């Protein structure tokens, strides 16, 4: 003890000072490995996930192109201008949905991340999956009542 503290606090003979070199160093508890870790213990699993994601993306693009070609095969326009406008409209809508998805995900996972209920990477992927499922199965019924208020009957 320092001389100043010895004046204020009497020395207790039952308490002995332990040098800091002898104190145990606390360690972080080992958490289970996540498939979203930067250095996964199984690098081939990450590679399989990337290949699977790419394959699903390619299948989706092929489906989009084939459906678009079949739908536009009926229209015989001498100009490429309508197709160009359609492409710009589709890219604008997809860009809006992409940015809107950032905001939806941030709002959906804020509490889960703050309370440490899920790992942030798992929470964002989980939210993305459910947002995608919502887009696939939504009917637009939520927008119909509000559209009746603004459109003349």
Image (cartoon, helix red, strand yellow):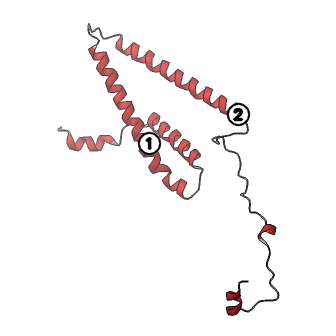
First-in-chain label (1 vs 2): 2
Q: Is residue 134 above or below residue 10?
A: above
Q: How many marks?
A: 2
Left or right for 31, reference 144: right
Say which of 11 and 108 sits in front: 11
Q: Would you name the residue on which mark 1 appears?
A: 102
Q: In the picture, residue 27 is in which quadrant?
A: bottom right
Identified at 71% across, 89% down, the residue is 6
Crowding near pointer 2: few (<14 within 10 Å), some, many (20+)?
Answer: few
Q: Whole-percent x and y of residue 151?
A: 20, 39
Quarter of the figure that contains the N terminus: bottom right
Identified at 76% across, 63% down, the residue is 25
Q: Is residue 79 above or below residue 29?
A: above
Identified at 40% across, 39% down, the residue is 99
Q: Is residue 76 above or below residue 94?
A: above
Q: Whole-percent x and y of residue 98?
A: 42, 36
Left or right for 6, reference 110: right
Left or right for 125, reference 80: right
> Marks 1 and 2: which is nearer the front?
2
Say which of 81 and 28 sits in front: 28
**Residue at far front of view:** 3
Q: In the picture, residue 135 is in which quadrant?
A: top left
SS at badge 2: helix
In three-dimensional space, the C-alpha distance between marks 1 and 2, rounded to whole angstroms, equals: 28 Å
Quarter of the figure that contains the C terminus: top left
The answer to whether mark 1 and mark 2 are in CB contact below 8 A is no
Q: Would you name the residue on which mark 2 appears?
A: 43
Identified at 29% across, 44% down, the residue is 145
């Amino acid at each position: 003890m320092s001389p100043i503290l010895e004046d204020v606090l009497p020395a207790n003979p039952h308490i002995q000072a332990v040098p800091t070199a002898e104190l145990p160093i606390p360690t972080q508890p080992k958490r289970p490995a996540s498939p979203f870790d930067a250095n996964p213990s199984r690098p081939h699993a990450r590679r399989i996930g990337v290949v699977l994601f790419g394959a699903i993306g390619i299948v989706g693009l092929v489906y989009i192109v084939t459906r678009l070609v079949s739908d536009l095969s009926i229209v015989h326009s001498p100009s490429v201008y309508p197709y160009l406008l359609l492409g710009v409209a589709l890219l604008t809508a997809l860009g809006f949905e992409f940015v809107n998805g950032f905001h939806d995900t941030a709002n959906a996972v804020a509490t889960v991340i703050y309370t440490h209920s899920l790992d942030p990477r798992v929470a964002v992927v989980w939210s993305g999956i459910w947002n995608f499922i919502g887009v696939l199965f939504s009917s637009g019924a939520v927008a119909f009542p509000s559209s009746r208020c603004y459109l003349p009957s």
